[in-house]
Amino acid sequence: MAYAIETTGLTKRFIQRRSLRQIVLHPLQRKTITALDGIDLQIKEGEIFGILGPNGAGKTTLIKVLSTLILPDKGKAWVNGYNILHNEESIKQSIGLVTSEERSFYWRLSGRGNLQFFATLYDMSPSQAERRINEILEIFELQEKADDLFHTYSTGIK
């Protein structure tokens, strides 16, 4: 049977970005984040298939690997019969991909810092802004990520 997409053991890890302070204090310490952990998929030609999961689950990473925007660390994958490691141009000619890289936030600020910045633009008082920011973070269950830098967020969180 021909598959539109087939993967075996697809794995992708990223080295977590560190602050200059962390690099100086712990130069040899590196933390990795596993975005894809041995993904096995078989999607038949003509089949409608959804990729669902919580923020940070690896959905965007999987799409980027399958569309040859990034390379996997391990595993194999074929898209429309083309090997992603050897047939990049053929894959790009056989698929369509639209990404939404977010550019309306400040990448060097935390999520909370971005919300504070926009609250200031809307002329909110500091106490009103803090109350509203905490409400928003609670609604979206992002309290634990609020002080992480924006550029470290997964696509779903952005």
Image (cartoon, rainbow, N blue to C red):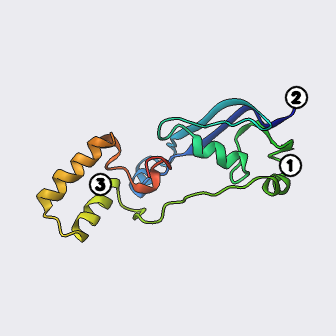
Q: Secondary structure at mark 2?
A: loop
Where in the figure is residue 115, as x and y percent of width and height?
29, 59
Q: Secondary structure at mark 3?
A: helix
Q: Disc 1 versus disc 3: distance between alpha carbons?
A: 42 Å
Q: Amino acid at mark 1?
A: His
Instruction: Read off the residue under disc 3.
Output: 112
149 versus 76 height, above or below: below
Quadrant where the N terminus sits is top right
Question: Crowdedness of circle 3 by 10 Å Cα count: few (<14), some, many (20+)?
Answer: many
Instruction: Read off the residue under disc 1.
Output: 86
Left or right: 76, with 81 as reference point: left
Q: Which mark is residue 1?
A: 2
Query: Are discs 1 and 3 less than 8 Å apart at CB?
Result: no
Q: Disc 3 versus disc 2: distance between alpha carbons?
A: 50 Å
Q: Disc 2 versus disc 1: distance between alpha carbons?
A: 22 Å
Dot in front, 3 or 2: 2
Q: Amino acid at mark 2?
A: Met
Dot in front, 2 or 1: 2
